[in-house]
Amino acid sequence: EVLADQIAAGEVVERPASVVKELVENAIDAKSTQIDIVVEEAGLKRIQVIDNGEGIPAEDVELAFKRHSTSKITSREDLFRIKTLGFRGEALPSIASVADVYLETSTETDVSGTLLHVKGGEQLEKKTSVRPRGTEITVADLFYNTPARLKYLKSLQTELAAISDIVNRLALSHNDIAISLSNNGHTLLQTVGNNDLQQTISAIYGVKNARQMVAFNGKDLDFKVAGYVSLPKLTRATKSYISLLLNGRYIKNFQLSNAIIKGYGSKLMVGRYPVAVVNITLDPLLVDVNVHPTKQQVRISKEDQLAQLLTKCVYDRIAQENL
Ligand code: ADP
Ligand code: MG
């Protein structure tokens, strides 16, 4: 059991940022309106995610740490209609197999909450606890029992940048949630959670950058795209300042990012990249999210057509501004 979990962890839990991603996605799935992420030493010492979501009923807490016991997929068709970010029931057991994990949770209706301590896949303690509705999960000493994994990690600075990156993107795709991130007591991000994308952009990329952004949108028979792109005056962005959301879910896609860069006219302005946040809406049947366990890579039918649409929308919008 523990070994299977550790093998799964090799796929799901690559680095501290992957733990942050899985825990925050769980908090989002639990309909939290506030999520606080507290890390120490770029997450290597400690990662704590505190939410005010639905919590886990006392009788389900142990089950949450059992592999696939929570899988929400019962048929192949379900794959295309997933409403939650998590669906494999793999993250918690994987994380708990390679770290020291404390989970404290409480639902609205339970008389008391639950505290569960799992280390290296072994349950060490379970007791009742008193806390308000929501879940607090603490992951300490990540990879303490898998030294090979530890060796693969980059500098603290790089690991922290990866955490920031993932939290930024989760914040951008969930404007309705107040999300904060701190490392060693320093606040790195604090969003308001008032559904205002431009405010989230401002919290992440700075007020100045946010002011330089204009809204754009467009559609064809299969896709609808809507977002914000910075005007070419802005020179301080890098390629990584492009965020793609597919039906509200953050994705990575090289071709689509490049399509935006192309529309922005980077050929004429070598080394300049836009800040861009784009939400792409499409029929879920055109996408298969089940390509990789971390679900960031997705396969899209008619990807060339979508790339062309993005290039055209961004190009037209910026041309309009330059008139
Ligand atoms: P998945 O998200 O794929 O279902 P996980 O291993 O990430 O699997 O989580 C297992 C289960 O634990 C979830 O399905 C959910 O029921 C519960 N859970 C985990 N984190 C939270 C949380 N922060 N709030 C409420 N429930 C949670
Ligand atoms: Mg999950």
Image (spheres, rainbow, N blue to C red):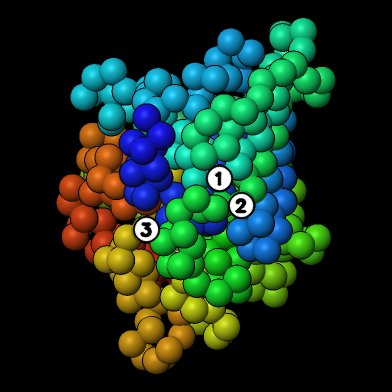
Local crowd size for mark 1, using a 10 Å CA cut-off: few (<14), some (14–19), many (≥20): many
Residue 10 seen in the figure: yes
Amino acid at circle 2: Asp
Horizontal side of residue 143 vs 289, given as left or right = right
**Residues under labels 2 and 1: Cα distance?**
6 Å
Q: Residue at x 60, y 66 (%)?
A: 160
Horizontal side of residue 212 vs 68, given as left or right = right
Between residue 215 and residue 72, name the one nearer to us: 72
Name the secondary structure under disc 3: loop
Amino acid at circle 1: Ala
Instruction: Please determine whether, in this image, residue 235 is positioned above or below residue 135.
Output: below
Q: Which residue is mark 1?
A: 99
Among numbered discs 2 and 1, the one appearing first in the sequence: 1
**Residues under labels 2 and 3: Cα distance?**
29 Å
Q: Residue at x 37, y 30 (%)?
A: 1
Between residue 42 and residue 55, name the one nearer to us: 42
Image coords of residue 281 (percent x, y): 37, 43
Q: Which mark is residue 141?
A: 2
Q: Which residue is mark 3?
A: 252
Q: Nearer the viewer, mark 3 or mark 1?
A: 1
Mark 3 CB within 8 Å of ligand 2: no
How many numbered dots are placed on residues in this image? 3
Q: Residue at x 35, y 67 (%)?
A: 257
Image coords of residue 229 (percent x, y): 50, 67
Instruction: Please determine whether, in this image, residue 156 is positioned above or below residue 226.
Output: below
